[in-house]
Amino acid sequence: MSAQNPYSNEYPMEDIPSEGIKKSEGKESGGKFIISHRFRYFILLLGLACLTSISSNLSALNFTFICMRKPLNETLFEISLSNKFSVPLKGDFMYTTNEKSALLWTAAIGSMIATFPFSFLYTQYGARYVFFIAGMISTFATLLVPIAANAGLYYFLALRFMLGIAYAADFAAIGVLCSRWASLKQNAIFLSFLTCFTPISSAITNPVSGILCESSYGWSAVYYVHGVASFILFLLWLHFYTDHPGKHQSVSTIEREKIHRDKSEAHINGDKYVPYWEIIKNPVILSVWLNAFVDLVSALFMLTYVPTYINSVLHFDVSKTGWLSALPGLSHIPPKLLCGQLSDRIKGNERVKLIVFNSIALIIPGIIFILVGHIPNEYPLVPVLFFATINAVIGANCGGFYKCGTLVSRQFSAFVIANTQFIKCISLFTGPILVSIFVHDESDKGQWMTIFYIFGICSFLANIVFCFMATDQPAAFTLLTKKEKNRT
């Protein structure tokens, strides 16, 4: 939604007081939306919905692996390619472990390849059109999955590659939204909401997929429903979003001042120059990425394999698996939002807060990972509750390494968070690799325990590194601008 800036000439930034703006002034200071002075929260929720949609489109396969074995109504899903030729969808897709891994890895490869191009495109052109294009790629690739699965594995792999490319847009979009729309005092709040997209997608996709798989429509309906929802959400994104809050007709002068308060000119204007090498070699940023890797590997592993573990090891049926596998995702969301609020509102030493929240996010899951494999088979609900607890406490990461990364990198947080996406791509490889090495029988709990031990030990080690490196101070590279580069 483009709009001319009605305030740029009347209200220069330096003339706007930081405190004490009267409420009566805000009524005449823009804010043509229903939530005057709080339009940034609408953008926050819309961004979260779009991030969740792309993630759901990608992760739908994790559940439909279970129900793709069931026959489809061939008459209902017959695809007419011409008046003389039609292809009925096959009713049974018994993929081997290697084929399942290939479908997961192909998406990871696509995401890995597209991560840096998307980071560059966001820096140069902003998120409005770039994220919209990514959303449309994800939408149409999702709608075509039933056709591709019927056509053959290679067609399915091609669509998974496209879904992976679209997925690469998610984390860089988080960086842009936080940099452009969040005030410095609300970084953790924005991060806590936006980084909820993975568990929210799991919490929505798994039960919906379970219901649709058990219905007369079959597993294909999972992809049609997700594709239509994605299409609608990204049309809303294109209509409402802009990369410049100060120029949006629904953002009042009061809200604009809150968003821009204490930010540098380069931060507000979105300087297109990024000191890549200085960021990459910064030890604090490296510790942030290390913790992100350990955190995301374990989180994505649970997102991908908890349905299989619940179905094969704990022996729950498909319908119950859908609801129970959604429980860990649902348990992640309230604690994460609470931690975002607490991190921004609790007064005290910011560095200490970063360490405390990061320790909660990594140490407690590490302990549970070591214990979860020892639960007797007579208590199948206990491991599910343990998985839910892991997801709940991981939510503290928004006040830990995520917040540290944005505070240290400031206007370059989009690049730092985008690299977290690259790490997430590696994580998509790591889970299937660990499973292919250690799990040869999906019903054998002992084989899964080795992976849980690895996650537990790595969580302890990563947090130790963060405790030494954490800081809330902007790095030296935040002072570098395009003008400074040309001058030197």
Image (spheres, grey):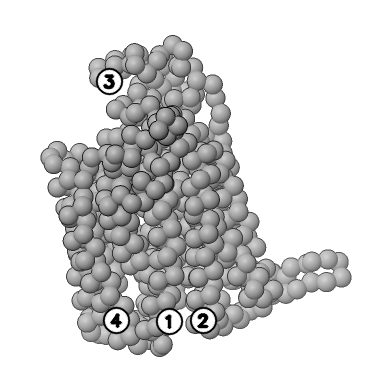
Amino acid on which the number 4 mark rests in the picture: Thr
Amino acid on which the number 2 mark rests in the picture: Asn
Residue 487 pos. (x, y %): 42, 29
The residue lying toward the viewer, choosing from 244 and 310, is 244
Residue located beneath label 1 in the image: 436
Residue 447 pos. (x, y %): 33, 85
Question: How much space separates mark 3 and mark 4, taking CA atoms?
Answer: 55 Å
**Does the CB distance between marks 2 and 1 fall below 8 Å?**
yes
Q: Secondary structure at mark 4?
A: helix
Residue located beneath label 2 in the image: 98
Q: Residue at x 33, y 67 (%)?
A: 298
Q: In the rendered image, which quarter contains the N terminus?
A: top right
The 10 Å Cα crowd at callout 4, few under 14, some 14 to 19, many 20 or more, is: some
Question: How much space separates mark 3 and mark 2, taking CA atoms?
Answer: 59 Å
Of mark 4 and mark 2, the one earlier in the sequence is 2
Of mark 3 and mark 4, the one earlier in the sequence is 3
**Does the CB distance between marks 3 and 2 fall below 8 Å?**
no
Q: In the rendered image, which quarter contains the C terminus?
A: top left
Q: Secondary structure at mark 3?
A: loop
The 10 Å Cα crowd at callout 2, few under 14, some 14 to 19, many 20 or more, is: few
Residue located beneath label 4 in the image: 450
Q: Is residue 468 above or below residue 274?
A: below
The residue lying toward the viewer, choosing from 166 and 140, is 166
